[in-house]
Image: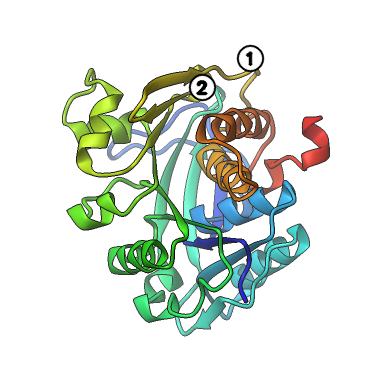
Amino acid sequence: MTAQVLVVGSANADLVVAAERRPGGGETVLGGDTETLPGGKGANTAVAAARLGADVALLGAIGDDGNGRLLLDSLRGSGVRTHLVRTVDRPTGVAYITVTPDGENSILVSPGANHALEPADVDGALDGARVLVTSLEIPLTTVEHAIAAAADAGVLTVLNLSPAAKLADRTLAALDVLVVNEHEAAWLLGDRSADPAGLLTLGPSSAVVTRGAGGAVVVTADGTTEVPSPEVEAVDTTGAGDAFAGALATALADGSTLADAVRSAVRVAAVSVTRRGAQPSYPAASELQ
């Protein structure tokens, strides 16, 4: 039997360097010391959920190297079940992250072992799960298979469509919750000023648009609901969207309504941006009282 929350996604080592500004084409900019931290959208989401008390497992792939061991230590130390994490003959994925003084970041991902995650790896992993949450740093065929299998099994399906990519219509139609940020929503709808309600015409039963410091918008067949974010001073926004996804999945697995789950997720994401790194920044449930 797997966990109540099953995360199907990536595990990366984050190589983070602070810089006054991001370099332009052909330009060299000096930065600070490099930090190597556990990351990856899937691993981040799983850790965020586990820190909040969720029964969560990660289905992913790492290499037999130091970065892979770093990730396993972080996952296990946070309470994530790792029996579904495969070790493969490819290097662990790496994300190269530049963080500027305003807390914003730019990220280049080398997927490595994440691209070895196959559709067949999902089969048999959904037994006992209440919520499947996945994202797009792994092969699209694996994402689409996971969503279809979860929908067939009656498991609530959540997709964090990041980084943005085109999915089959049947995949979008099998989603209970589509999570996108404002840029991804604009990409999907072809218009930055488009009504978020238009996301439902693509097939999902509901959608959530995250807006950073602006909170989030919940879109259902009954209309839209705006959820504000607490005011905080951002230090590093790396992994904030994954913190949101993990908190959202945790609340949904506990039986919360989508609107209430989003309220919880906004609070968790707000806390995460006040600390450096992705997984190290995620709060425990006791910190949210």
- Place residue 218 in its image quadrant: top left
Residue lying at 37% horizontally and 66% vertically, measured from the top left: 152
Eye-nearest disc, 2 or 1: 2
Query: Mark 2 falls on what kind of element?
Result: loop
Q: Residues within 10 Å of mark 2 (few under 14, many from 20)?
A: many
Q: Is residue 205 left or right of residue 270?
A: left
Residue 217 placed where, x, y %?
Answer: 43, 24
Residue lying at 21% horizontally and 41% vertically, measured from the top left: 202
Which residue was labeled with disc 2? 215
Q: In the rendered view of the protein, which quadrant contains the N terminus?
A: bottom right
Residue lying at 37% horizontally and 71% vertically, measured from the top left: 115
Q: Is residue 86 left or right of residue 47?
A: left
Which residue was labeled with disc 1? 231
Q: In the rendered view of the protein, which quadrant contains the C terminus?
A: top right
Residue 185 placed where, x, y %?
Answer: 29, 32
Q: 111 above or below 217?
A: below
Q: Is residue 287 left or right of residue 26?
A: right
Q: How far is the residue under mark 2 from the one under mark 1?
A: 10 Å
Residue 3 placed where, x, y %?
Answer: 63, 66
Query: Mark 1 falls on what kind of element?
Result: loop
Q: Amino acid at mark 1?
A: Glu
